[in-house]
Image (cartoon, rainbow, N blue to C red):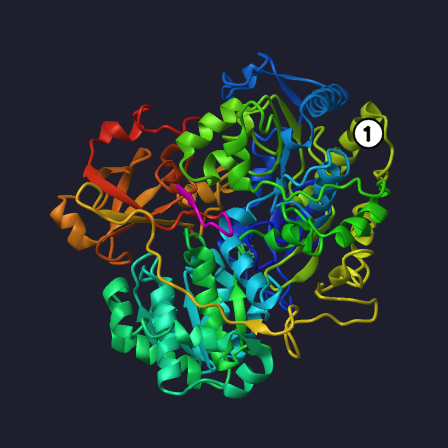
C-alpha cells in the first residue's frame, strides 16, 4: 500500500454539490482521493468524477508553457490550431507583454465596447473577482459574463424578479426534512449524484414522497410517488395547472399570501385557462396526475422544489422558473427548513462566480451596474475616479460572440470556458470566433475554443492552487493546493494580476490594487463591500465552510433564506402565459431533441475526456425510444445521423425506454459528435439563455463509415 507524503483537504472541481475531497499525494502526484465521513456536504460519499476524475492534471497534452501562434491570426481568417507545431513556446514576459500591447492597442483605438471577457465557473471566487475587476476597472466595460448564462440564467432572473435573491433558498441536505418534494428538469442521479443519494434517503428512510416531472424516465422515477412525463418545454402549463388545482380546491395558504406576497389577485385572473385538461393537451401529462401532484405538494407540511436545466434552458426559461415560484408562494412552502425553491447549480463554482460579479448586469454581491450608488461603492474600493466606472449594462455570453465584428467586440479573453462546445448552434459560433481580432485563452488544455487563440496562458487546475468555491448551498469552502504547479503553469489569480499591472502601466494609470500576496487578501477586499461575504475569512471556513449570507465576523451563516422577509420585501406572483418552444416537431424534423449531461463526463469535456473517465464512457450515444426505433429501422448500437436545421452529427443509437416517444436525447460532452451543432440559438428574451432543451431533429440510419466522416463531424479536432 502506498503511504502518502501528505493528505490535502480541498473541494471537488466538478459539480455544484461541492463535496469535500482528501487528495493523497506521493512524490508530488495525487494518487488517491478519499473523503471524510463527517464532511458536512457529502457525509463520506463521492461520485465517480470526484473519486477518480483527477488524472487529467497529469495528462501529457496538458499545456504548462505559455504559447503564441506561429502564424499571426487576422479577423475573418482565424483558424483552429490543436497541433502544438502551430504554436511556439514563449516566456511568461513575452506572452504577457504581447497580450498587454494588443489589448491596449485595441482599447485605445475602439474603446470599452470592443473589449469582452468570459470568466469561469470552474475557477475560484478569487480568480473570478479579479478578472471582472480587471475588465471593469481598467477597460471600463461590463462586457463580463460566464456560463451561468448557459445553465440557470432563467432561474436567476425569475428568482430575482420574484424574491430579490437568486440562490437556492435552502440547503440540499434539508431534503431529508421534506414531506413531499418535486424534482423537475434535473437528472439528479447523473448531474448531482450526492444530492440524489440524499433524495433517495429522504424517500426510503424518512418516508418523503417524491414527484418527478421530467420528459425522461430518469433513475429517480423508480422511487417516485408520481412521474409526470411532460413534453420538453411544457413546464408552464403543467405547473400552472397545478396552481389552478390548488386554488380550485382551496389548498392555498392564505396567511402566507396575505403576509408575505403581492400580485395574487392579478395572478388569479390569469389562471382560468390553465385547467389540467388544457395542460394535458399540451404536455401529454394526464390531467388526473397533475391534480394528484398539486394535492400532494399543497397538503404537505413541508414541501420543496428542486430543479435543473430542464426548467431554465428554454426560450421561456424565466417563465418556467416563475411557474415553480408561484407554487411556493401559493402554499407558503418557502422560508422554513425543509421547504424552498432550489435550483441545483451545475458547475462547482457557478454560484461563486455569479456572487463575484462575473455577470454583465451586476458587480459582486448582485449590485446593479446601472445604479450610481453601487458604482460609487466599487469606485472607492478600486481607487477609481468618481464616475469612472461604466453604468452601461454589458453584453451576455450569448451576445458577446454575436457582436464579434467590425465596430463591435474585437478582443476577447476566455478564462477556462469553451464556447466552441457550450454555445448553441456551433456552426454559427465558429463564424463568430473567426471574426475576432484578438483572442486570449487561459486554460489547462488547448480545447476547441483555445485552438482559435493568439495567446495561450497555461493556468493551474484546482489541485495546484488556493482559494474558495461557493457550492449550490451557498457554502463557501476552501480549495487548497496539493502540490506546486506543473511546468510554468500559474494560478489564474496570479496571471490576471501580472497582466493587469502591465495594462495599467501602458495606459499610464495606477489606480486599482494588484499586489496581493495570497488569494485570501482578494476575498477580504471583496467581502469589505459585499455584505453576504463580510464575515467570511479563511480561518472561519478552514474546516467546514460557511453558508452565506454571513454579514459579520460573529455570524454563523444562513442555511435557510427568507424566514422573515424577501430581499425585495414581498414575494411577487407573476401571471404567465404558455409560449411553445420555438421549434416543434413536424414532418421534416419529427423528433424533439433534448440534451444533457452524463455521470462520467463534465460539460465540454476538457477535464473528463482527458481522464480515465473517458474509458468508462468513450463515445456519444443518442437515446431513442423502442417504438420510434422500430418505425425508423434502427437497432441498438446502429450508427445514425441526427440532423437539425443547423447541423448534423453521426452517433450510435441506444434504444431505450429511458426516453419517451418522439423525444431523443444527446449528451453534449463529445467534440466529435457535438450536440450543440444541432441546438437552437434562440434566446429567452429576459435571461438571454438559449433553448438547449428542445429543437426539432430527424434521425436516419447511417453507415459505419459515416461515424468518421469529417464533413459530418464538423466540430473537428482532438486536443
Ligand atoms: Fe464532485 Fe459533484 Fe461528484 Fe460530489 S457529486 S464528487 S461535487 S462531481
Residue 633 appears at what percent x and percent y?
A: 13, 43
Residue 193 appears at what percent x and percent y?
A: 48, 60
Left or right of residue 701, residue 52 in this image: right
State yes or no: Cβ of the residue under disc 1 lies below 8 Å from any atom of ligand 1.
no
Quarter holding residue 21: bottom right
Return the residue found at the far top: 71
Residue 274 appears at what percent x and percent y?
A: 32, 71
Vertical relation: 414 (above or below) 87: below
- The foreground one among 273 and 456 is 273
- The foreground one among 497 and 716 is 497
Highlighted range, magenta:
681-688
Residue 256 appears at what percent x and percent y?
A: 55, 83
Quarter holding residue 498: top right
Residue 152 seen in the current view: no
Left or right of residue 450, residue 487 in this image: right
Query: Where is ligand 1, by quadrant?
Result: bottom right
Q: Is residue 540 magenta?
A: no
Residue 672 seen in the current view: yes
- The foreground one among 68 and 159 is 159
The residue tagged 1 is: 504
Vertical relation: 329 (above or below) 433: below
- The foreground one among 213 and 365 is 365
Vertical relation: 73 (above or below) 480: above
**Callout count:** 1
Name the main secondary structure of what is drawn in magenta: loop
Q: Residues within 10 Å of mark 1 (few under 14, many from 20)?
A: some
Q: Residue at x 55, y 41 (%)?
A: 397
Q: Residue at x 51, y 20 (%)?
A: 83
Q: Is residue 683 magenta?
A: yes
Q: Secondary structure at mark 1?
A: helix
Quarter holding residue 715: top left
Amino acid at each position: 500500500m502506498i503511504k502518502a507524503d501528505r493528505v490535502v483537504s480541498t473541494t471537488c472541481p466538478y459539480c455544484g454539490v461541492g463535496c469535500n475531497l482528501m487528495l493523497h499525494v506521493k512524490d508530488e502526484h495525487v494518487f488517491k482521493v478519499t473523503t471524510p465521513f463527517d464532511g458536512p456536504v457529502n457525509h463520506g460519499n463521492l461520485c465517480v468524477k470526484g473519486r477518480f476524475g483527477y488524472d487529467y492534471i497529469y495528462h501529457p497534452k496538458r499545456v504548462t508553457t505559455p504559447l503564441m501562434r506561429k502564424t499571426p491570426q487576422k479577423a475573418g481568417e482565424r483558424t483552429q490550431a490543436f497541433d502544438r507545431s502551430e504554436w511556439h513556446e514563449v516566456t511568461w514576459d513575452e506572452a504577457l507583454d504581447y497580450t498587454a500591447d494588443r489589448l491596449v492597442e485595441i482599447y485605445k483605438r475602439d474603446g470599452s465596447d470592443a473589449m469582452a471577457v468570459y470568466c469561469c465557473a470552474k475557477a475560484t471566487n478569487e480568480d473570478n473577482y479579479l478578472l471582472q475587476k480587471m475588465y471593469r476597472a481598467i477597460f471600463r466595460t461590463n462586457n463580463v459574463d460566464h456560463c451561468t448564462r448557459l445553465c440557470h440564467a432563467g432561474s436567476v432572473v425569475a428568482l430575482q424578479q420574484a424574491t430579490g435573491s437568486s440562490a437556492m433558498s435552502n440547503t440540499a441536505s434539508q431534503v431529508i426534512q421534506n414531506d413531499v418534494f418535486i424534482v423537475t428538469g434535473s437528472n439528479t442521479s447523473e448531474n448531482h449524484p450526492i444530492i440524489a443519494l440524499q433524495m433517495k434517503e429522504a424517500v426510503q428512510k424518512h418516508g418523503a414522497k417524491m414527484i418527478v416531472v421530467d420528459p425522461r424516465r430518469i433513475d429517480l422515477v423508480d422511487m417516485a410517488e408520481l412521474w409526470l412525463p411532460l413534453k420538453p418545454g411544457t413546464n408552464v402549463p403543467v405547473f400552472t395547472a397545478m396552481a389552478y388545482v390548488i386554488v380550485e380546491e382551496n389548498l392555498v395558504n392564505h396567511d402566507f399570501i396575505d403576509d408575505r406576497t403581492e400580485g395574487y389577485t392579478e395572478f388569479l385572473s390569469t389562471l382560468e385557462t390553465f385547467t389540467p385538461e388544457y395542460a394535458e393537451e399540451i404536455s401529454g401529462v394526464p390531467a388526473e396526475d397533475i391534480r394528484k401532484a398539486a394535492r400532494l405538494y399543497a397538503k404537505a407540511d413541508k414541501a420543496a422544489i428542486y430543479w435543473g436545466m430542464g426548467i431554465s434552458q428554454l426560450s421561456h426559461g424565466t417563465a418556467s422558473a416563475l411557474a415553480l415560484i408561484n407554487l411556493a408562494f401559493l402554499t407558503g412552502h418557502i422560508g422554513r427548513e425543509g421547504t424552498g425553491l432550489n435550483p441545483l447549480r451545475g458547475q462547482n463554482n457557478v454560484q461563486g462566480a455569479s456572487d463575484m460579479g462575473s455577470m454583465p448586469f451586476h458587480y459582486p454581491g448582485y449590485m446593479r451596474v446601472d445604479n450610481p450608488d453601487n458604482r460609487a461603492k466599487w469606485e472607492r474600493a478600486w481607487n477609481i475616479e468618481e464616475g469612472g466606472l461604466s453604468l452601461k449594462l454589458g453584453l451576455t455570453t450569448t451576445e458577446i460572440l454575436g457582436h464579434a465584428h467590425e465596430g463591435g467586440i474585437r478582443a476577447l479573453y476566455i478564462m477556462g470556458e469553451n464556447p466552441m462546445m457550450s454555445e448553441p448552434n456551433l456552426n454559427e459560433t465558429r463564424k463568430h470566433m473567426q471574426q475576432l481580432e484578438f483572442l486570449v485563452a487561459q486554460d489547462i488544455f488547448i480545447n476547441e475554443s483555445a485552438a482559435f487563440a493568439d495567446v495561450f496562458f497555461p493556468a493551474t487546475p484546482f489541485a495546484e492552487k488556493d482559494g474558495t468555491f461557493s457550492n449550490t448551498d451557498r457554502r463557501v469552502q476552501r480549495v487548497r493546493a496539493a502540490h506546486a504547479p506543473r511546468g510554468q503553469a500559474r494560478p489564474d489569480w496570479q496571471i490576471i494580476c501580472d497582466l493587469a499591472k502591465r495594462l495599467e502601466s501602458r495606459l499610464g494609470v495606477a489606480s486599482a490594487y494588484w499586489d496581493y500576496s495570497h488569494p485570501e487578501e482578494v476575498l477580504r477586499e471583496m467581502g469589505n463591500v459585499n455584505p453576504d461575504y463580510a464575515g467570511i475569512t479563511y480561518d472561519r471556513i478552514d474546516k467546514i465552510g460557511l453558508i452565506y449570507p454571513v454579514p459579520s465576523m460573529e455570524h454563523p451563516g444562513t442555511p435557510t433564506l427568507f424566514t422573515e422577509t424577501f430581499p425585495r420585501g414581498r414575494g411577487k406572483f407573476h401571471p404567465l402565459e404558455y409560449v411553445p418552444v420555438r421549434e416543434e416537431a413536424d414532418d421534416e424534423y419529427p423528433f424533439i431533441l433534448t440534451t444533457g449531461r452524463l455521470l462520467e463526463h463534465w460539460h465540454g469535456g476538457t477535464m473528463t475526456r482527458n481522464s480515465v473517465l473517458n474509458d468508462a464512457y468513450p463515445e456519444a450515444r443518442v437515446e431513442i425510444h423502442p417504438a420510434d426505433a422500430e418505425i425508423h429501422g434502427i437497432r441498438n448500437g446502429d450508427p445514425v445521423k441526427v440532423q437539425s436545421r443547423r447541423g448534423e452529427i453521426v452517433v450510435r443509437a441506444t434504444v431505450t425506454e429511458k426516453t419517451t416517444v418522439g423525444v431523443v436525447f444527446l449528451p453534449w460532452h463529445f467534440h466529435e459528435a457535438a450536440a450543440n451543432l444541432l441546438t437552437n440559438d434562440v434566446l429567452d428574451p429576459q435571461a438571454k439563455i438559449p433553448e438547449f432543451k428542445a429543437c426539432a431533429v430527424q434521425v436516419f440510419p447511417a453507415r459505419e463509415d459515416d461515424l468518421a466522416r469529417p464533413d459530418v463531424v464538423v466540430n473537428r479536432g482532438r486536443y
